Amino acid sequence: MTAELDINIIRQVCNNGDIKWTTHTLERMQERNIEPTDVINCIMYGVIIEQYPHAYPYPACLILGTGVNANNIHIVLGYGNELIWIVTVYEPDENEWENEFTKRKDKTQ
């Protein structure tokens, strides 16, 4: 049985500094001018907008928050072995998201 992730647990793990950054994430962050402080800010003050309880190898979620410069950021992260695994980080595209970047647009319309 899998459970949805709890933002409060994620924040506690983040506060402890128990974060793993994948090479993919670090490369994308550099390309997109997103700093680690932006990611931390997003986790600490953002909201989970999608849950992926069956993600492999750990349950994951999508968090919407803001960077330190108030730019919108999406973070996909997994949680397992008492660690946060940052999968990817990006600024959401208004052509793909609605409701202030909380809901994917219907591509069938």
Image (spheres, grey):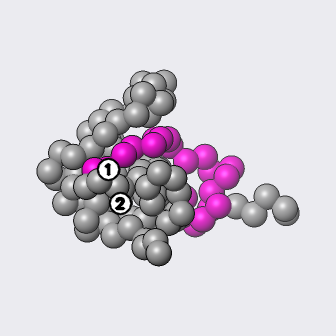
Q: Which residue is mark 2?
A: 46
> Is residue 20 in view?
yes
Q: Amino acid at mark 2?
A: Gly
- Near-viewer residue (94 or 57): 57
Which of the pair 77/89 is nearer the observer? Answer: 77
Q: Residue furthest left?
A: 16
Q: Position of residue 46 (x, y in %)?
A: 35, 60
Mark 2 secondary-structure assignment: loop
The answer to whether marks 1 and 2 mark residues whose Cβ atoms lie closer than 8 Å is no
Per the rendered image, the range of residues in magenta is 83-104
Where residue 79 sits, quadrant-wise, is bottom left
- Residue sitting at 39 percent across and 44 percent down? 86
* Residue 76 pos. (x, y %): 46, 50
- Judge from the rendering whether residue 27 lies leftward or rightward of residue 6; answer left or right: right
Q: Residues within 10 Å of mark 2 (few under 14, many from 20)?
A: many
Q: Which residue is mark 1?
A: 84
